[in-house]
Image (cartoon, rainbow, N blue to C red):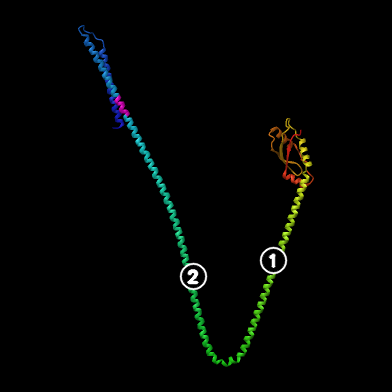
Amino acid sequence: MNRQNQDKIINIVSAVLTGLVFIGVGLFTYSNYEKPKPASINPEFKISDENKVQQSERIDTEVVENELNRLAEEKRAEEARIAAENARIAAERKAAEERRIAEEKAKVEAAKRAAEEKRIAEEKAKAEAAEKAKAEAAKKEAEAKRLAEETAKAEAAKKAAEVKRLADEKAKAEAAKKEAEAKRLANEKAKAEAAKKEAEAKRLAEEKAKAEAAKKEAEAKRLAEEKAKAEAAKKAAEEKRLAEEKAKAEAARIADENARIAAALNNDYLAKVQSYLESLWVIPIGSYGLEATVQFRVKEDGTIVGDPKIVKSSGNENFDNSVFVAAMTATKIPMPDDPIVRKYLAKEGFELIFKPKN
């Protein structure tokens, strides 16, 4: 039975019970309506009728209440059943959604694994193809080498056969010619021997001349190399000497500059600069015992560049400000006459301590 039919039945029962209530109330009203009473009626019978009416009213009320309670209980039970059904449906939906998500996740993981397996398979196929190509190349190279060796062997055999054939033909020609030219050879043997000796002597002379020329060339080359080495060593020694002299000169120059700077930046000069700045300093009242360090940069003519900087505070803002104002008020710091010292001060700047005197 669905919820709509149950609601219809509950509404019908409620209407019937409501009607019964109205009927009971009507009977009660009718029974209490005052009518002419015969004098002969027994009072005991009257009381009994009223009790019956009241008892009937109580029974009707109890029936109605019981029915309403039953209907309410059924309604609560139905609502609980519907809530349980809704919870079951929600749980089934949740489980279905979780299964769907798990299935989608499994599909994604499977796709990833398939893609990875495909990538590995492709890489393996590429590696195998590369290895196969390498093996094919090695095989072709070996085959080409084998063919080249066989060709070389065939050429060598062919040349040897040709040499042998020519030698045989020559031997036959010599044998045939030997008898015919025996006399001529005998007559020309002396000339040939003489020519041979002369040619050998000439060859030996040429070889000796070549050897002498090669020896002279090698000696000249050796001497040239030794000379070049000597020149290079001499040049390196000269360069080293010049570098050492330059380093000594630079060290002497730096030492001279440092000495000039140290001599110029003596206590008298620093006191002069300190006195100049303190002449511009308006010392705050109650500043005794305080001190602050100010730092500033200058050009080579003594003009202050940028703003001064308090690098060590006195701990008193008014005192620090008075030192800052004194440095800012300065137009040109007294500079030494030496340009080297002025250049040094322009590079390094000044750092002075301001401390009130007793």
Picture layout, residue 149 above or below residue 26: below
Rounded to the nearest angstrom, the CA distance separating label 2 from label 1 is 48 Å
Q: Is 33 in front, or is 312?
A: 312
Q: 10 Å neighbourhood of mark 2: few (<14), some, or many (≥20)?
A: few
Magenta region: which residues? 69-76
Upstream in sequence: badge 2 or badge 1:
2
Residue farthest bottom in this picture? 183
- Residue named by callout 1: 229
Q: Residue at x 35, y 35 (%)?
A: 87
Q: Residue at x 76, y 52 (%)?
A: 253
Q: Secondary structure at mark 2?
A: helix
- Residue named by callout 2: 145
Q: Position of residue 207 (x, y in %)?
A: 64, 79
Magenta residue check for 74: yes
Q: Position of residue 16 (x, y in %)?
A: 27, 23
Q: Position of residue 241 (x, y in %)?
A: 73, 59
Residue 129 in the figure: left or right of residue 250: left
Picture layout, residue 303 above or below residue 230: above
